[in-house]
Image (cartoon, grey):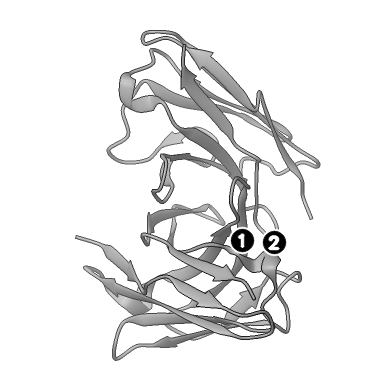
Amino acid sequence: QVQLVQSGAEVKKPGASVKLSCKASGYTFTNYAIHWVRQAPGQRLEWMGWINAGKGDTKFSQKFQGRVTITRDTSASTVNMELSSLRSEDTAVYFCARETTAGRRVSFFDHWGQGALVTVSS
Amino acid sequence: DIQMTQSPSSLSASVGDRVTITCRASQSISSYLNWYQQKPGKAPTALIYAASTLQSGVPSRFSGSGSGTDFTLTISSLHPEDFAIYYCQQTYSTPQTFGQGTKVEIK
């Protein structure tokens, strides 16, 4: 069965960076894109960016441009997301999610990781 | 960015009730609208994609409709396991954006 297993919770100081991982299993890793979505406490879901796990192309929300990097390791079926220059507002649960397509331009997230809490505090 | 606004933000309902949640986009998004359910401490799960297509394994009491800017998610008869937060998501343009969520609580 399809699984996305994320790395654990992190506590970081303002200005630091955090790197989260998302290990995929149960499907052909390079056939799907992986997205990162975060959720601050009590807030809506917020899309950060995605990577085409096959080609390695990436695209990011302008809000995070310059601060976020998404990479993939096809040998390990793992996607990594690094967010730099952390501030308190980055405290959130970070999810990875697999995008599946269902026709021309139709897509949705059919599998999600369990989430990883990142706390930014001095 | 396209703004997604859900209404109501919360509602109280009883088991067996029919529930309708609305999602409005700030501009036309055709039918590029998905619905997710999220329970406390868990990741969201997909219910509906392309505005009205039921995701595999999702009970038929869930249905979606709409196109352009106005969309609805309907639960025909609430079950105990349906008490959760529901989010809409537009995938028409980048960045993808979500509604603020609708919390369905037990009356």
The residue beneath circle 1 is: A47
What x and y, as percent, mark residue B77?
38, 12
| Nearest to the observer: residue A16 or residue B66 | A16
- Secondary structure of the residue carrying tag 1 is strand
Query: What residue is rendered at 36% in x and 20% in y?
Result: B61
Label 2 marks a residue whose chain is: B
Q: Is residue A98 above or below residue B6?
A: below
| Residue B55 falls in image quadrant | top left
Q: Amino acid at mark 2?
A: Pro
Q: Is residue B101 left or right of residue B47?
A: right
Left or right: B15 in relation to B101: left
A88 vs B37, nearest the viewer: A88
- Image check: B75 left or right of A66? left
Badge 1 local density, few (<14 within 10 Å), some, or many (20+)? Answer: many
Image spot of residue B101 (x, y percent): 60, 37
Residue at the image position 36 percent from the left and 79 percent from the top: A30
Report whether A59 appears left or right of A101.
Answer: right
Which image quarter holds the N terminus of chain B? Answer: bottom right
Out of A21 and B98, give the one closest to the viewer. Answer: A21
Q: Which residue is at 65% across, 41% downward? A: B99
Marks 2 and 1: CB-CB under 8 Å? yes
In the image shown, does B28 or B47 lie closer to the viewer?
B47
As drawn, B60 above or below B5: above
Name the kind of residue labelled 1 in the image: Trp
x%, y% of residue A103? 48, 53
Q: Which residue is mark 2?
A: B95
